[in-house]
Image: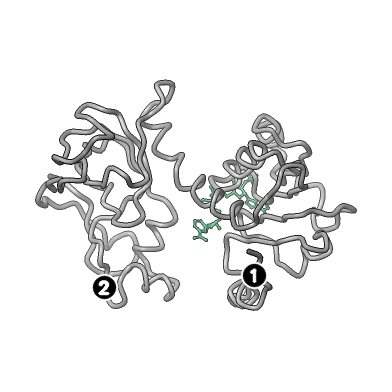
Amino acid sequence: MKAAVYYKYGPPQVVSLAEIEKPKPADNEVLIKIFVATVNRTDSGFRSAEYFVSRFFSGLFKPKFNVLGNEFAGEVEAIGKNVTLFKVGDKVFGYNDKKFGAHAQYMTMAEDDTMATMPHILSYEQAAPLTEGAHYALCDIRAAKVQSGQNVLVNGATGAIGSAAVQLLKFFGANVTAVCNTANVDLVKSLGADAVIDYTKQDFTKLNATFDFVFDAVGKSSYGKCKPLLTKNGLYISTELGKNGENILLALTTYIRW
Ligand SMILES: NC(=O)c1ccc[n+]([C@@H]2O[C@H](COP(=O)([O-])OP(=O)(O)OC[C@H]3O[C@@H](n4cnc5c(N)ncnc54)[C@H](OP(=O)(O)O)[C@@H]3O)[C@@H](O)[C@H]2O)c1
């Protein structure tokens, strides 16, 4: 089968097309014929290993996964003998950041991994890019233990993570204030935001309001600037490391809520 492969860290040019062996599903796995896969920030991070810390996941000296691709949509072509959740011909989509492999014509995945049959209303092109942003948004919302009725501010509300966060937070019953560009105000309202701040006209860190959770889904703010917006037990989470990696230090020294 054809696959986009890479054997050393570096710029996009380290990736090339190659013919490699088609994978065979283990007893608990399905073989998926990939129709659509994305190239997202996780792929780019694993390809470049720009942040050294990422090598603890991607391989210390060289990549341990030679085919990237974590968001995918496709069709089940074969199943292992113990598979019960899927059948041949099922249209599936999902997120594979354990083994990657979606930048290829075929990929295997355990049936109980992050994969589901596709809703009929979605095309392959719509289904594949849905998963990573929602994955990170849900992880952070769970970490913040958001309760119904709480006030939450989402910065970067139109991105993959931010747009999923707005919708998930509304699902969990939060009051959502969303920050975005002028062109995206209507889009963000349509996602369910209760209030929208246009960052080209207003600096959200100067708002005269407090929030139980400030979620910077695009990593453009800092804890220091957002602290005045937080309630007494309010939480700040950013999807970026912050200046000089400060968010790692802040996370390590912050009181852990169970
Ligand atoms: N921690 C992790 O493991 C992890 C994993 C994946 C991604 N990330 C990081 O999370 C961030 C978001 O990722 P993503 O995939 O959701 O990105 P994305 O889809 O590219 O979205 C970024 C969004 O940020 C908005 N934006 C840009 N400048 C802004 C500003 N100054 N203020 C407010 N919003 C602004 C843009 O919307 P407008 O058009 O409204 O400006 C855009 O829609 C990235 O920095 C990425 O590196 C972290």
Q: Is mark 2 within 8 Å of ligand 1?
A: no
Label 2: few (<14), some or many (≥20) within 10 Å? Answer: some
**Quadrant occupied by the C terminus:** bottom right
The quadrant in which residue 44 appears is bottom left
If the image is split into quadrants, where does the N terminus sit? Answer: top left
Foreground disc of the pair 1, 2: 1
Identity, as a three-letter code, of the amino acid under mark 1:
Ile
Q: Residues within 10 Å of mark 1 (few under 14, many from 20)?
A: few
In the displayed structure image, the side of residue 99 where residue 24 appears, left or right: left
* Image x and y of residue 157, in percent: 65, 45
Amino acid at circle 2:
Lys
The correct choice, above or below, for 220 with respect to 177 in the image is below
Residue found farthest to the right: 208
Depth check: 95 or 225 in front? Answer: 95
Q: Residue at x 60, y 40 (%)?
A: 168
Against 71, residue 90 (above or below) is above
Q: Residue furthest top?
A: 121
User: Image point 72% across, 39% down: which residue?
Assistant: 182
Q: Give the residue pinned by disc 1.
A: 256
Q: Position of residue 184 (x, y in %)?
A: 67, 37
Q: Regarding mark 2 in the picture, which secondary structure is present there?
A: loop
N-terminal-most mark, 1 or 2: 2
Tag on residue 98? none
**At which x and y percent is residue 83?**
21, 39
Q: Secondary structure at mark 1?
A: loop
Q: Classify residue 121 by image quadrant.
A: top left
Residue that numbered label 2 is attached to:
62
Report how far apart the C-alphas of labels 1 and 2 lie in the structure.
34 Å
